[in-house]
Image (tube, helix red, strand yellow):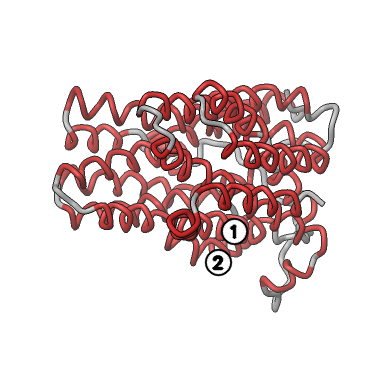
Amino acid sequence: MPREGKSGVRTLYFLIFITLLNHSVFAGMRVSVSLYALHLHATPFTVGVLMALYALLPMLSAVSMGRLIDRIGSRVPMLIGSIAIALGALVPYLWPTLTALHLTSVLIGSGFMMYQVAAQNIIGYIGPPEDRPMTFSLAALGFSVSGFVGPMLAGFGIDALGHIATFGAFAVFPLLPIAVLGLNKLRLPQPHANALPEPGRSVVDLLRHRVLRHVFVASGLLAAAWDMFTFAIPIYGSRIGLSASSIGLVLGSFSVATFVIRGLLPAISRRLSAWPLLTVSLGTAATVFFLFPLLERASFLMAVAFLLGLGLGMSQPMVMSLLHNTAPAGRVGEAIGVRMSLVNMSQIAMPLLFGALGTALGMLPVFWATAVLLSLGGL
Protein backbone atom coordinates (compact mmCIF):
# COMPACT_ATOMS: atom_id res chain seq x y z
CA MET A 1 0.00 0.00 0.00
CA PRO A 2 1.32 3.50 -0.81
CA ARG A 3 2.75 5.37 2.16
CA GLU A 4 0.95 8.70 1.79
CA GLY A 5 -1.26 8.29 4.86
CA LYS A 6 -4.93 7.40 5.25
CA SER A 7 -6.18 10.51 3.46
CA GLY A 8 -3.95 9.87 0.46
CA VAL A 9 -4.91 6.20 0.32
CA ARG A 10 -8.62 7.11 0.33
CA THR A 11 -8.02 9.66 -2.42
CA LEU A 12 -6.14 7.11 -4.53
CA TYR A 13 -8.75 4.38 -4.16
CA PHE A 14 -11.68 6.70 -4.82
CA LEU A 15 -9.87 8.17 -7.83
CA ILE A 16 -9.33 4.64 -9.15
CA PHE A 17 -13.03 3.89 -8.59
CA ILE A 18 -14.36 6.89 -10.53
CA THR A 19 -11.79 6.19 -13.25
CA LEU A 20 -13.13 2.63 -13.40
CA LEU A 21 -16.63 4.04 -13.96
CA ASN A 22 -15.52 6.28 -16.82
CA HIS A 23 -13.32 3.62 -18.42
CA SER A 24 -16.17 1.09 -18.24
CA VAL A 25 -18.20 3.47 -20.40
CA PHE A 26 -15.27 3.96 -22.79
CA ALA A 27 -14.68 0.22 -23.19
CA GLY A 28 -18.34 -0.78 -23.18
CA MET A 29 -19.46 1.88 -25.64
CA ARG A 30 -16.81 0.79 -28.15
CA VAL A 31 -18.53 -2.59 -28.24
CA SER A 32 -22.03 -1.12 -28.15
CA VAL A 33 -21.33 1.38 -30.92
CA SER A 34 -19.85 -1.32 -33.17
CA LEU A 35 -22.74 -3.71 -32.63
CA TYR A 36 -25.41 -1.05 -33.08
CA ALA A 37 -23.73 0.20 -36.26
CA LEU A 38 -23.83 -3.36 -37.63
CA HIS A 39 -27.46 -3.59 -36.48
CA LEU A 40 -28.10 -0.50 -38.65
CA HIS A 41 -26.45 -2.35 -41.59
CA ALA A 42 -23.28 -0.27 -41.57
CA THR A 43 -20.38 -1.59 -43.67
CA PRO A 44 -17.18 -2.88 -42.02
CA PHE A 45 -15.44 0.24 -43.33
CA THR A 46 -17.95 2.46 -41.51
CA VAL A 47 -17.40 0.51 -38.30
CA GLY A 48 -13.66 1.01 -38.78
CA VAL A 49 -14.19 4.74 -39.15
CA LEU A 50 -16.24 4.82 -35.95
CA MET A 51 -13.45 3.07 -34.05
CA ALA A 52 -10.81 5.36 -35.57
CA LEU A 53 -12.78 8.42 -34.41
CA TYR A 54 -12.23 7.27 -30.82
CA ALA A 55 -8.50 7.82 -31.31
CA LEU A 56 -8.17 10.52 -34.00
CA LEU A 57 -8.90 13.69 -32.01
CA PRO A 58 -7.07 12.42 -28.91
CA MET A 59 -4.02 11.73 -31.08
CA LEU A 60 -4.06 15.32 -32.33
CA SER A 61 -4.90 17.07 -29.07
CA ALA A 62 -3.36 15.03 -26.22
CA VAL A 63 -0.14 17.09 -26.09
CA SER A 64 -2.06 20.38 -25.94
CA MET A 65 -4.30 18.92 -23.25
CA GLY A 66 -1.25 17.86 -21.25
CA ARG A 67 0.14 21.40 -21.40
CA LEU A 68 -3.20 22.81 -20.26
CA ILE A 69 -3.26 20.39 -17.32
CA ASP A 70 0.26 21.47 -16.36
CA ARG A 71 -1.04 25.05 -16.16
CA ILE A 72 -4.48 24.71 -14.56
CA GLY A 73 -4.36 21.38 -12.72
CA SER A 74 -6.30 18.14 -13.17
CA ARG A 75 -9.74 18.63 -11.59
CA VAL A 76 -11.44 20.76 -14.26
CA PRO A 77 -10.19 18.66 -17.22
CA MET A 78 -11.31 15.51 -15.40
CA LEU A 79 -14.75 17.09 -14.85
CA ILE A 80 -15.12 18.22 -18.47
CA GLY A 81 -13.92 14.82 -19.69
CA SER A 82 -16.49 13.04 -17.52
CA ILE A 83 -19.27 15.28 -18.86
CA ALA A 84 -18.19 14.54 -22.44
CA ILE A 85 -18.25 10.79 -21.73
CA ALA A 86 -21.78 11.03 -20.31
CA LEU A 87 -22.98 13.09 -23.28
CA GLY A 88 -21.35 10.62 -25.68
CA ALA A 89 -23.39 7.77 -24.21
CA LEU A 90 -26.55 9.89 -24.05
CA VAL A 91 -26.48 11.02 -27.71
CA PRO A 92 -27.43 7.65 -29.29
CA TYR A 93 -29.96 7.06 -26.50
CA LEU A 94 -31.79 10.24 -27.55
CA TRP A 95 -30.87 10.11 -31.26
CA PRO A 96 -30.37 6.46 -32.31
CA THR A 97 -28.90 6.95 -35.79
CA LEU A 98 -25.63 6.15 -37.52
CA THR A 99 -24.77 9.86 -37.61
CA ALA A 100 -25.17 10.02 -33.84
CA LEU A 101 -22.69 7.17 -33.44
CA HIS A 102 -20.01 9.26 -35.16
CA LEU A 103 -20.60 12.07 -32.66
CA THR A 104 -20.57 9.53 -29.83
CA SER A 105 -17.16 8.20 -30.90
CA VAL A 106 -15.69 11.71 -30.94
CA LEU A 107 -17.21 12.72 -27.59
CA ILE A 108 -16.25 9.57 -25.69
CA GLY A 109 -12.81 9.26 -27.25
CA SER A 110 -11.93 12.90 -26.61
CA GLY A 111 -13.59 13.01 -23.19
CA PHE A 112 -11.78 9.96 -21.93
CA MET A 113 -8.47 11.23 -23.28
CA MET A 114 -8.98 14.46 -21.34
CA TYR A 115 -9.93 12.57 -18.19
CA GLN A 116 -7.14 10.00 -18.48
CA VAL A 117 -4.28 12.44 -19.07
CA ALA A 118 -5.42 14.49 -16.07
CA ALA A 119 -5.92 11.44 -13.84
CA GLN A 120 -2.57 9.91 -14.74
CA ASN A 121 -0.93 13.25 -14.06
CA ILE A 122 -2.43 13.59 -10.58
CA ILE A 123 -1.93 9.94 -9.55
CA GLY A 124 1.82 10.46 -9.78
CA TYR A 125 1.64 13.11 -7.04
CA ILE A 126 -0.11 10.82 -4.55
CA GLY A 127 2.61 9.63 -2.23
CA PRO A 128 6.40 9.84 -2.54
CA PRO A 129 8.18 9.27 -5.89
CA GLU A 130 9.52 5.87 -4.81
CA ASP A 131 5.92 4.62 -4.47
CA ARG A 132 4.93 5.52 -8.04
CA PRO A 133 5.38 2.02 -9.52
CA MET A 134 3.06 0.66 -6.81
CA THR A 135 0.57 3.52 -7.17
CA PHE A 136 0.33 3.18 -10.95
CA SER A 137 0.09 -0.61 -10.59
CA LEU A 138 -3.03 -0.19 -8.47
CA ALA A 139 -4.46 2.25 -11.01
CA ALA A 140 -3.71 -0.17 -13.86
CA LEU A 141 -5.46 -2.93 -11.94
CA GLY A 142 -8.58 -0.76 -12.00
CA PHE A 143 -8.24 -0.44 -15.78
CA SER A 144 -8.05 -4.23 -16.05
CA VAL A 145 -11.32 -4.54 -14.13
CA SER A 146 -13.15 -1.91 -16.18
CA GLY A 147 -11.69 -3.25 -19.43
CA PHE A 148 -13.45 -6.52 -18.62
CA VAL A 149 -16.61 -5.13 -17.00
CA GLY A 150 -17.43 -2.56 -19.71
CA PRO A 151 -17.62 -4.95 -22.70
CA MET A 152 -19.31 -7.62 -20.56
CA LEU A 153 -22.04 -5.19 -19.48
CA ALA A 154 -22.43 -4.07 -23.08
CA GLY A 155 -22.97 -7.62 -24.31
CA PHE A 156 -25.37 -8.68 -21.56
CA GLY A 157 -27.14 -5.30 -21.67
CA ILE A 158 -27.79 -5.49 -25.40
CA ASP A 159 -29.07 -9.07 -25.14
CA ALA A 160 -31.34 -8.29 -22.18
CA LEU A 161 -32.43 -4.69 -22.76
CA GLY A 162 -31.53 -3.77 -26.33
CA HIS A 163 -29.05 -1.30 -27.76
CA ILE A 164 -30.85 1.93 -26.86
CA ALA A 165 -31.40 1.06 -23.20
CA THR A 166 -27.76 0.01 -22.92
CA PHE A 167 -26.66 3.44 -24.17
CA GLY A 168 -28.85 5.04 -21.52
CA ALA A 169 -27.43 2.81 -18.79
CA PHE A 170 -23.86 3.74 -19.72
CA ALA A 171 -24.80 7.45 -19.58
CA VAL A 172 -25.48 7.00 -15.84
CA PHE A 173 -21.98 5.73 -14.99
CA PRO A 174 -20.17 9.11 -15.22
CA LEU A 175 -22.69 10.88 -12.97
CA LEU A 176 -20.77 10.03 -9.79
CA PRO A 177 -17.44 11.32 -11.19
CA ILE A 178 -19.24 14.47 -12.38
CA ALA A 179 -20.79 15.06 -8.96
CA VAL A 180 -17.59 14.40 -7.01
CA LEU A 181 -15.41 16.54 -9.26
CA GLY A 182 -18.02 19.26 -9.78
CA LEU A 183 -18.53 19.69 -6.04
CA ASN A 184 -14.77 19.44 -5.45
CA LYS A 185 -15.22 16.62 -2.95
CA LEU A 186 -12.04 14.77 -3.92
CA ARG A 187 -8.90 16.09 -2.24
CA LEU A 188 -6.51 16.01 -5.18
CA PRO A 189 -2.83 16.73 -4.48
CA GLN A 190 -1.25 19.72 -6.17
CA PRO A 191 2.10 19.69 -8.00
CA HIS A 192 4.86 21.55 -6.21
CA ALA A 193 4.80 25.31 -6.63
CA ASN A 194 8.32 25.33 -8.06
CA ALA A 195 7.30 22.90 -10.79
CA LEU A 196 5.70 25.45 -13.09
CA PRO A 197 6.43 25.02 -16.81
CA GLU A 198 8.87 27.43 -18.40
CA PRO A 199 7.49 29.43 -21.34
CA GLY A 200 8.72 28.91 -24.89
CA ARG A 201 9.23 25.15 -24.64
CA SER A 202 8.10 22.68 -27.33
CA VAL A 203 7.58 18.95 -27.66
CA VAL A 204 10.96 18.76 -29.39
CA ASP A 205 12.60 19.55 -26.05
CA LEU A 206 10.97 16.49 -24.53
CA LEU A 207 12.07 14.32 -27.45
CA ARG A 208 15.65 15.56 -27.03
CA HIS A 209 15.65 14.37 -23.43
CA ARG A 210 17.56 11.07 -23.76
CA VAL A 211 15.90 9.09 -20.97
CA LEU A 212 12.44 10.45 -21.75
CA ARG A 213 12.93 9.62 -25.43
CA HIS A 214 13.70 6.00 -24.49
CA VAL A 215 10.50 5.90 -22.44
CA PHE A 216 8.47 7.20 -25.40
CA VAL A 217 10.03 4.63 -27.76
CA ALA A 218 9.40 1.75 -25.37
CA SER A 219 5.85 2.95 -24.72
CA GLY A 220 5.11 3.22 -28.45
CA LEU A 221 6.48 -0.26 -29.16
CA LEU A 222 4.52 -1.84 -26.32
CA ALA A 223 1.31 -0.08 -27.40
CA ALA A 224 1.89 -1.36 -30.95
CA ALA A 225 2.43 -4.88 -29.59
CA TRP A 226 -0.86 -4.70 -27.68
CA ASP A 227 -2.72 -3.51 -30.79
CA MET A 228 -0.96 -6.13 -32.90
CA PHE A 229 -2.15 -8.91 -30.60
CA THR A 230 -5.80 -7.82 -30.44
CA PHE A 231 -5.94 -7.23 -34.20
CA ALA A 232 -3.89 -10.15 -35.52
CA ILE A 233 -4.93 -13.07 -33.31
CA PRO A 234 -8.51 -13.25 -34.69
CA ILE A 235 -7.08 -13.19 -38.24
CA TYR A 236 -4.36 -15.75 -37.49
CA GLY A 237 -6.76 -17.97 -35.56
CA SER A 238 -9.24 -17.98 -38.44
CA ARG A 239 -6.50 -18.84 -40.94
CA ILE A 240 -5.35 -21.87 -38.95
CA GLY A 241 -8.91 -23.09 -38.44
CA LEU A 242 -9.60 -22.20 -34.82
CA SER A 243 -13.23 -21.80 -33.80
CA ALA A 244 -14.56 -18.45 -32.62
CA SER A 245 -14.72 -19.75 -29.05
CA SER A 246 -11.09 -20.90 -29.21
CA ILE A 247 -10.01 -17.49 -30.48
CA GLY A 248 -12.00 -15.93 -27.64
CA LEU A 249 -10.18 -18.15 -25.14
CA VAL A 250 -6.81 -17.02 -26.50
CA LEU A 251 -7.83 -13.37 -26.16
CA GLY A 252 -9.32 -14.05 -22.74
CA SER A 253 -6.12 -15.72 -21.57
CA PHE A 254 -4.27 -12.51 -22.36
CA SER A 255 -6.80 -10.41 -20.42
CA VAL A 256 -6.64 -12.67 -17.37
CA ALA A 257 -2.85 -12.40 -17.35
CA THR A 258 -2.91 -8.59 -17.41
CA PHE A 259 -5.19 -8.65 -14.38
CA VAL A 260 -2.97 -11.16 -12.55
CA ILE A 261 0.29 -9.29 -13.13
CA ARG A 262 -1.21 -5.94 -12.15
CA GLY A 263 -2.42 -7.49 -8.93
CA LEU A 264 1.11 -8.71 -8.22
CA LEU A 265 2.94 -5.56 -9.34
CA PRO A 266 2.65 -3.65 -6.05
CA ALA A 267 4.69 -6.41 -4.39
CA ILE A 268 7.05 -6.86 -7.35
CA SER A 269 7.74 -3.12 -7.65
CA ARG A 270 9.03 -3.06 -4.08
CA ARG A 271 11.86 -5.36 -5.17
CA LEU A 272 12.56 -4.28 -8.75
CA SER A 273 12.72 -0.78 -10.23
CA ALA A 274 10.78 0.38 -13.28
CA TRP A 275 13.52 0.11 -15.93
CA PRO A 276 14.33 -3.59 -15.36
CA LEU A 277 10.62 -4.41 -15.38
CA LEU A 278 10.12 -2.49 -18.63
CA THR A 279 13.05 -4.36 -20.19
CA VAL A 280 11.48 -7.66 -19.10
CA SER A 281 8.19 -6.53 -20.65
CA LEU A 282 9.83 -5.82 -24.02
CA GLY A 283 11.79 -9.07 -23.96
CA THR A 284 8.75 -11.15 -23.06
CA ALA A 285 6.66 -9.58 -25.81
CA ALA A 286 9.43 -10.11 -28.39
CA THR A 287 9.72 -13.80 -27.44
CA VAL A 288 5.98 -14.38 -27.67
CA PHE A 289 5.63 -12.71 -31.07
CA PHE A 290 8.44 -14.92 -32.36
CA LEU A 291 6.58 -18.01 -31.10
CA PHE A 292 3.06 -17.13 -32.26
CA PRO A 293 3.34 -18.16 -35.96
CA LEU A 294 5.04 -21.42 -34.96
CA LEU A 295 2.03 -22.57 -32.93
CA GLU A 296 -1.37 -23.77 -34.12
CA ARG A 297 -2.93 -25.59 -31.16
CA ALA A 298 -5.31 -23.43 -29.16
CA SER A 299 -3.85 -24.59 -25.84
CA PHE A 300 -0.34 -23.53 -26.85
CA LEU A 301 -1.59 -20.18 -28.13
CA MET A 302 -3.45 -19.63 -24.86
CA ALA A 303 -0.25 -20.31 -22.93
CA VAL A 304 1.86 -17.83 -24.88
CA ALA A 305 -0.99 -15.29 -24.88
CA PHE A 306 -1.01 -15.54 -21.09
CA LEU A 307 2.75 -14.95 -21.09
CA LEU A 308 2.26 -11.93 -23.35
CA GLY A 309 -0.41 -10.60 -21.00
CA LEU A 310 2.04 -10.83 -18.11
CA GLY A 311 4.65 -8.90 -20.09
CA LEU A 312 2.44 -6.17 -21.53
CA GLY A 313 0.28 -5.91 -18.42
CA MET A 314 3.22 -4.70 -16.35
CA SER A 315 4.36 -2.13 -18.91
CA GLN A 316 1.85 0.71 -18.49
CA PRO A 317 2.42 1.26 -14.74
CA MET A 318 6.19 1.25 -15.30
CA VAL A 319 5.94 3.71 -18.20
CA MET A 320 3.80 6.10 -16.15
CA SER A 321 6.20 5.90 -13.21
CA LEU A 322 9.19 6.65 -15.46
CA LEU A 323 7.38 9.56 -17.14
CA HIS A 324 6.73 11.18 -13.78
CA ASN A 325 10.28 10.58 -12.60
CA THR A 326 12.07 11.82 -15.74
CA ALA A 327 9.85 14.57 -17.21
CA PRO A 328 11.12 18.14 -16.64
CA ALA A 329 9.51 20.04 -13.78
CA GLY A 330 6.05 21.32 -14.67
CA ARG A 331 5.82 19.26 -17.88
CA VAL A 332 4.56 15.92 -16.64
CA GLY A 333 1.12 16.46 -18.16
CA GLU A 334 2.69 17.35 -21.51
CA ALA A 335 4.86 14.20 -21.39
CA ILE A 336 1.77 12.10 -20.64
CA GLY A 337 0.07 13.80 -23.58
CA VAL A 338 2.95 12.84 -25.89
CA ARG A 339 2.61 9.23 -24.78
CA MET A 340 -1.16 9.38 -25.28
CA SER A 341 -0.66 10.71 -28.83
CA LEU A 342 1.72 7.84 -29.60
CA VAL A 343 -0.76 5.28 -28.24
CA ASN A 344 -3.64 6.71 -30.27
CA MET A 345 -1.47 6.91 -33.37
CA SER A 346 -0.75 3.21 -32.89
CA GLN A 347 -4.46 2.44 -32.54
CA ILE A 348 -5.14 4.13 -35.87
CA ALA A 349 -2.09 3.09 -37.88
CA MET A 350 -1.27 -0.42 -36.67
CA PRO A 351 -4.46 -2.19 -37.83
CA LEU A 352 -4.04 -0.60 -41.28
CA LEU A 353 -0.33 -1.45 -41.49
CA PHE A 354 -0.65 -4.97 -40.11
CA GLY A 355 -3.66 -5.66 -42.29
CA ALA A 356 -1.81 -4.58 -45.45
CA LEU A 357 1.34 -6.54 -44.59
CA GLY A 358 -0.63 -9.60 -43.57
CA THR A 359 -2.56 -9.57 -46.84
CA ALA A 360 0.59 -9.18 -48.93
CA LEU A 361 3.06 -11.38 -47.03
CA GLY A 362 1.10 -13.54 -44.61
CA MET A 363 1.15 -13.38 -40.84
CA LEU A 364 4.57 -14.93 -40.10
CA PRO A 365 6.62 -11.95 -41.37
CA VAL A 366 4.32 -9.58 -39.49
CA PHE A 367 4.73 -11.43 -36.19
CA TRP A 368 8.50 -11.71 -36.61
CA ALA A 369 8.92 -8.08 -37.67
CA THR A 370 7.12 -7.09 -34.48
CA ALA A 371 9.43 -9.37 -32.48
CA VAL A 372 12.50 -7.72 -34.01
CA LEU A 373 11.25 -4.21 -33.24
CA LEU A 374 10.47 -5.15 -29.64
CA SER A 375 13.91 -6.74 -29.27
CA LEU A 376 15.60 -3.58 -30.53
CA GLY A 377 13.52 -1.50 -28.13
CA GLY A 378 14.81 -3.56 -25.23
CA LEU A 379 18.46 -2.85 -26.03
Q: Is residue 300 left or right of residue 374?
A: left
Amino acid marked by disc 1: Gly
Dot 2: what SS?
A: helix
Q: Amino acid at mark 2?
A: Ser
Q: Disc 1 on helix, strand or loop?
A: helix
Residue wearing tag 2? 64
Confirm whether residue 121 shows in the render: no
Distance of mark 2 from mark 1, alpha carbons? Answer: 7 Å
Q: Which residue is mark 1?
A: 337
Could you tell me which residue is drawn at 64 percent across and 61 percent down?
334
Q: Quadrant of the N terminus?
A: top right
Q: Nearer the viewer, residue 126 or 158?
A: 158
Residue at (44, 28) in percent of width and height = 148
Badge 2 vs badge 1, beta-carbon distance below 8 Å: yes
- Give the left or right position of residue 214, taking residue 157 as reference: right
Q: Position of residue 93 (x, y in %)?
A: 18, 42
